[in-house]
Image (cartoon, rainbow, N blue to C red):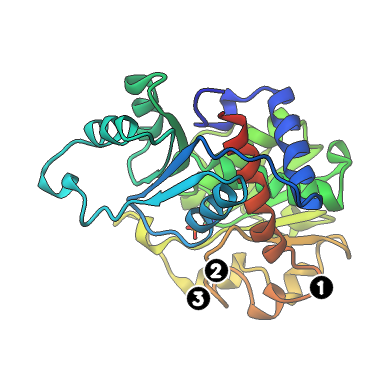
Amino acid sequence: MQHFLEISELSLDEIENLLERALHFKYQSHYPHLSGYAVANLFYENSTRTRISFEMAANHLSMKVVNIDLHKSSESKGETIEDTLLNLSAMGISHAVIRHSQNGLPKQLAHTLGNKIHIINAGDGQNAHPSQALLDLMTITEQKPDLKNLKIVILGNIRHSRVANSLQSLFKTMQVGELVCIAPKVWQPQIKPYGRVTEDIEDGLKNADVIICLRVQKERLQETEQFDLQEYRKHFALTPHTLKLAHPKAMIMHPGPINHNVEIDSVLVDCPQSFILHQVQNGVFMRMGILEGLT
Ligand code: CP
């Protein structure tokens, strides 16, 4: 791989190899020494999990890490992001981890910069969040490896979710048995790469093996979208009551950050069926696999 941009650019072999490497790193404390490489984190949007886990991953692999303070960078004086990356490359940065609000920007940068630097998409607008999807897959397969016989549900604000886009793409490649996206009409996906879509939570959650809740992204709502939080909770929140519709051993997942008692009740975030912190833990190992795969 030269760049890590979108799930749809990965073959089944590449996905399986990343899963294998991430699991290897999880259970083995002797890591490769990739000290000849240097990673720059460029986060134009806030992040806790993705930024810190890429930093931890790079540290485990003995890579140097630079967290760029974008308020103090020369982009504030009008320098382009392309010029910023070319200058970072000239200083010896080999990998740029980029989160940005503009859909498709990492892909555009990869096209412009070619082999001068490895571009890693850490979430672009509403388009893609491929490392999140892979760590979610890792978390699922650790518990329920028979993907072809699973019913997986993605619940919530699917239209605005880059995580949902990457998950749909990944579950298609992995041929997950059944994928159901549950959302109110206004948040249903405009493009449906895989699975079926419903606004009926009873039908959608019935016997689900895995439930991936999505954050209500108030910052991404359009002015045209009427949003009544109480009405949303009544029909679409994961609560102890709605969880009863799913398989008794259904996994509860959430990419974070969580709006407690909005899309999911607090009591479920921290219950035995919750794998939310397992996702966060696995994120470090999956990102080690991604960084290693780009050397
Ligand atoms: N899941 C996720 O991308 O979280 P952060 O925004 O904290 O990185």
Q: Which of 97 and 201 is in front in this view?
A: 97
The crowd level at tag 2 (other Cα within 10 Å; few <14, some 14-19, many 20+) is some
Q: What amino acid does circle 1 point to? A: Pro
Instruction: Mark 2 or mark 1: name the one nearer the start of the chain.
Output: 2
Secondary structure type for disc 3: helix
Coordinates of residue 109 in the picture (x, y in percent)? 34, 28
Query: For mark 3, what is the residue?
Result: 230
Q: Is residue 126 in sight in this rendering?
A: no
Q: Which of 288 and 203 is in front in this view?
A: 288
Query: For mark 2, what is the residue?
Result: 258
Callout 3: CB less than 8 Å from ligand 1: no
122 left or right, relative to 8: left
User: Residue placed farthest to the bottom in the image?
Assistant: 267
Mark pair 3, 2: CA separation? 17 Å
Secondary structure type for disc 1: loop
Q: Which mark is residue 272?
A: 1
Coordinates of residue 78 in the picture (x, y in percent)? 11, 42
Callout 2: CB less than 8 Å from ligand 1: no
Name which quarter of the figure residue 282 lies in: bottom right
Q: Residue at x 80, y 68 (%)?
A: 273
Q: In this view, does 199 lie above or below 121?
A: below
Q: What amino acid does circle 2 point to? A: Ile
Mark pair 3, 1: CA separation? 27 Å
